[in-house]
Image (spheres, rainbow, N blue to C red):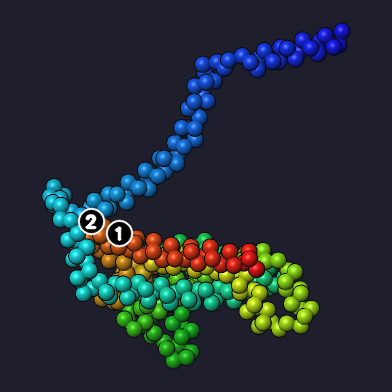
């Protein structure tokens, strides 16, 4: 009897499995791949449309004061940018700002990462505090430091008075403006590099370090031959993110000095902003942004190649 019931159940299950799907289920199965791909298509269009529009603007003469007149001019906007004497100044300021800020942040971030990698009461207190600058918007942090470096009531100049620099010019002088905005950038973004490198240090395997310690290897030898090569992928990622962000820096410089004094800190983003919303030359602004995009894409391509090479070398080791 039990065998007959089991046979009946198996036959009924086979009949259900062999039954053709309902029209609703078939329609769902047919549309499911398109529904899964739809969000990515919408996101791609959302990203590519402003880029394509910028390319279109850069190939036309588009002035916001005369929006009805948009004649096609080809590469004339790019020719005007590259032949402008101020263009080389913009490139030099952008690169100088980027290299100086990233170099200082990498050095300080690595020192902080090694310091916080030790388990002590001090490091447990410092780790949460390290996140505080990252929680402040760069524009807000810049305005805070602009107030604190004010020659009349800023506390920074109060402490500078003890070394004979009561009225240090900071952002008001062409000689110190770059240093001022770089220090603000370092204060905001050094924790980012420190936390990223700290995560890398915590993920490194301990067996090679224990073997080196048993062999009597010194701290410098261990750092040079083990720690630095194994940490290199994390360093490259941190440097790449900071270089790309520094090349596109706008809010810190605009909040601190508005690109001044004069054109001392006239970076790509700031010049493109002024071209579009001060001089109303939207086409030249779009051309500047696209030139900056080519530079950032080339740098990111090279950095990603070095990152892949560092990972392959680490796996091979």
Give the crowd class for mark 2: few <14, some 14-19, many >=20 residues within 10 Å.
Answer: many
Of label 1 and label 2, which has the lower sequence position?
2
Q: Is residue 205 left or right of residue 1?
A: left
- Determine if residue 138 is in view: no
Query: In this picture, is 264 found above or below 67?
Result: below
Residue denoted by label 2: 58
Q: Are marks 1 and 2 in contact (CB under 8 Å)?
A: yes
**Could you say whether the residue bearing mark 1 is in a helix, strand or loop?**
helix
Q: Residue at x 39, y 84 (%)?
A: 168
Residue 74, given in percent of the width and then of the height, sits at 18, 56
Residue 186, given in percent of the width and then of the height, sits at 48, 73
Residue 15, given in percent of the width and then of the height, sits at 67, 12
Q: Nearer the viewer, residue 263 or 70?
A: 70
- Determine if residue 99 is in view: yes
Q: Is residue 9 left or right of residue 273?
A: right
Give the crowd class for mark 1: few <14, some 14-19, many >=20 residues within 10 Å.
Answer: some
**Could you say whether the residue bearing mark 2 is in a helix, strand or loop?**
helix
Q: Residue at x 29, y 72 (%)?
A: 90
Q: Nearer the viewer, residue 294 or 8?
A: 8
Q: Residue at x 43, y 77 (%)?
A: 100
Farthest-out residue, right: 1
> Spatial distance from mark 1 to mark 2, Cα to Cα?
8 Å
Q: Residue at x 67, y 66 (%)?
A: 204
The quarter in which the C terminus is drawn is bottom right
Task: Report how many numbered discs are placed on residues in the image.
Answer: 2
Q: Quadrant of residue 3?
A: top right
Residue 249, given in percent of the width and then of the height, sits at 38, 66
Q: Is residue 304 left or right of residue 50?
A: right
Farthest-out residue, front: 316
Residue denoted by label 1: 290
């Amino acid at each position: 009897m039990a065998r007959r019931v089991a046979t009946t159940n198996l036959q009924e299950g086979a009949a259900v499995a062999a039954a053709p799907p309902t029209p609703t289920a078939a329609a769902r199965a047919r549309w499911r791949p398109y529904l899964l791909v739809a969000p990515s298509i919408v996101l791609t269009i959302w990203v590519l449309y402003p880029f394509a529009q910028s390319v279109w603007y850069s190939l036309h003469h588009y002035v916001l004061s005369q929006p009805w007149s948009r004649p096609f001019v080809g590469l004339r906007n790019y020719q005007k940018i590259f032949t402008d004497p101020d263009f080389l100044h913009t490139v030099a300021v952008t690169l100088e700002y980027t290299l100086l800020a990233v170099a200082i942040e990498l050095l300080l971030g690595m020192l902080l990462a090694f310091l916080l990698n030790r388990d002590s009461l001090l490091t447990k207190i410092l780790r949460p505090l390290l996140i505080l600058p990252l929680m402040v918007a760069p524009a807000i942090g810049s305005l805070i430091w602009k107030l604190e470096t004010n020659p009349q009531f800023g506390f920074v100049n109060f402490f500078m008075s003890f070394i004979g620099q009561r009225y240090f010019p900071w952002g008001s002088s062409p000689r110190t403006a770059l240093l001022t905005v770089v220090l603000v950038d370092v204060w905001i973004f050094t924790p980012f590099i420190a936390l990223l490198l700290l995560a890398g240090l915590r993920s490194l395997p301990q067996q090679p370090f224990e073997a080196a310690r048993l062999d009597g290897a010194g701290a410098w030898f261990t750092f040079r031959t083990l720690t630095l090569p194994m940490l290199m992928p994390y360093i490259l990622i941190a440097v790449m993110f900071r270089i790309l962000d520094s090349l596109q820096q706008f809010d810190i410089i605009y909040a601190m000095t508005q690109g001044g004094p004069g054109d001392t800190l006239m970076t790509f983003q700031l010049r493109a902003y002024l071209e579009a919303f001060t001089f109303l030359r939207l086409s030249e602004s779009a051309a500047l942004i696209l030139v900056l995009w080519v530079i950032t894409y080339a740098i990111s391509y090279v950095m990603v190649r070095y990152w892949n090479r560092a990972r392959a070398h680490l796996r091979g080791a």
